[in-house]
Amino acid sequence: MSSIKLIGLRKDFGQETVIPDLNLEIHDGSFTVLVGPSGCGKSTTLRIIAGLEKPTAGEILIDGKNVADVPPGKRNLAMVFQNYALYPNMTVRSNIEFGLKNKGIVKKKRDALINEVCEIVGLSPYMERKPGNLSGGQRQRVALARAMVKKPRVFLMDEPLSNLDAKLRASMRIELIELHKRLQTTFVYVTHDQVEAMSMGDSIVLMNEGVIMQHSSPKAIYHDPQNVFTARFIGTPPMNVFEGMLEDFSVGFRPEKVLFEKPEDVKHLVINGKVITREQLGATINYSVETKYGMMMVHTDFDTEQTKCTFYVPVSALFLFAKDGTRCAFSDTQLKTLLKL
């Protein structure tokens, strides 16, 4: 296992700066997920850690040693890519064995390592098949086994499930979580899918334009967002954030906190609106509601066919954001103003 620390990391591509000044600590044995919109710098960060991209400036510390000038093959890291990068003319065994042969590991030890990892990832019955005769999930397991067999200090994964269908992605997420628990090593995982991030990681790094917007546990990043970007990016549907309720500030609340029935025992915000769309999601429903402050999303198990409705949001569920998007605390005066709306 290994810890990773990035200090003052900068990456320029020509005249464009994609990572201006990144400072990040990834703890030993953690499952850390880098998440954010396309182009936010998450894959570039991963490739810099792997040594596939050279930073313009900054330090990359692995277990306290700066590896910025160390070649990729000397860093003892394993990377799993989106496209698997398997050799189509080789069997499963040969694909996994290829790197071990290049390292000069003797056959007896190679066989022991291959049998061990294939047992872990469920590939033992498919050792003599070629990639073209495997399912997407099986090919992904081959890529994982090829990484595992090197016994790396860190696993780096760049959107490894994006080519799989939704059902297979869900099952592979569970397998990766179990694999991390079993190996007890450091995983660094890149995705643009917040469901993957929130369900898999124990540490979430949310990025935008090369900047870390928040680095927290999944629970904290959802229930305690530190800025508007985090509040709107994390959550399905995303947080409702409105300007116009309070001068110079925005007010936000999660769609599932909206009530159709007036709460009698708690202070609450009252909003009148018109239901525009109704999306049935099994046991729950998403409503998009037009209000004088803008479009609002409501996620609830309350079923209604009404068009004009009044909604209630408990004060305890409200968030306040300053003009620059940072989270701040309500004053008593601001709360009184909201309750009079």
Image: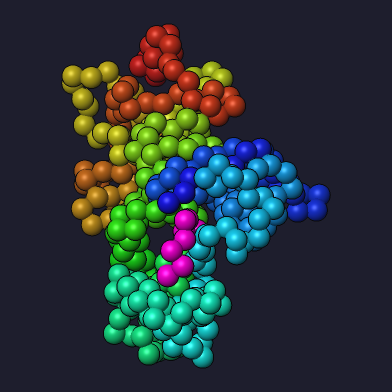
Is 75 or 6 nearer to us in this picture? 75
Q: Is residue 182 left or right of residue 333?
A: left
Query: Which colour assignment does the render follow?
Result: rainbow
Q: Position of residue 249 (x, y in %)?
A: 52, 22
78 magenta-colored = no
Q: Is residue 165 visible?
A: yes
Q: Position of residue 135 (x, y in %)?
A: 38, 81
Q: Position of residue 332 (x, y in %)?
A: 39, 9
Residue 122 position (above or below residue 36): below
Is 158 or 297 nearer to us in this picture? 158
Residue 333 position (above or below residue 6): above
| Residue at screen point 39% across, 89% down | 129
| Residue at screen point 59% across, 53% down | 49
Is 341 or 13 nearer to us in this picture? 13
Number of disc labels: 0
Q: Is residue 208 visible?
A: no
Q: Residue furthest right?
A: 15
Is 146 or 173 nearer to us in this picture? 146
Q: Is residue 264 left or right of residue 5?
A: left
Q: Is residue 66 left or right of residue 281?
A: right
Q: Magenta part of the protein: which range?
A: 149-158
Residue 231 position (above or below residue 94): above
The image quadrant of residue 174 is bottom left
Residue 243 position (above or below residue 12): above
Q: Position of residue 281 (x, y in %)?
A: 28, 56
The image quadrant of residue 308 is top left
156 magenta-colored = yes
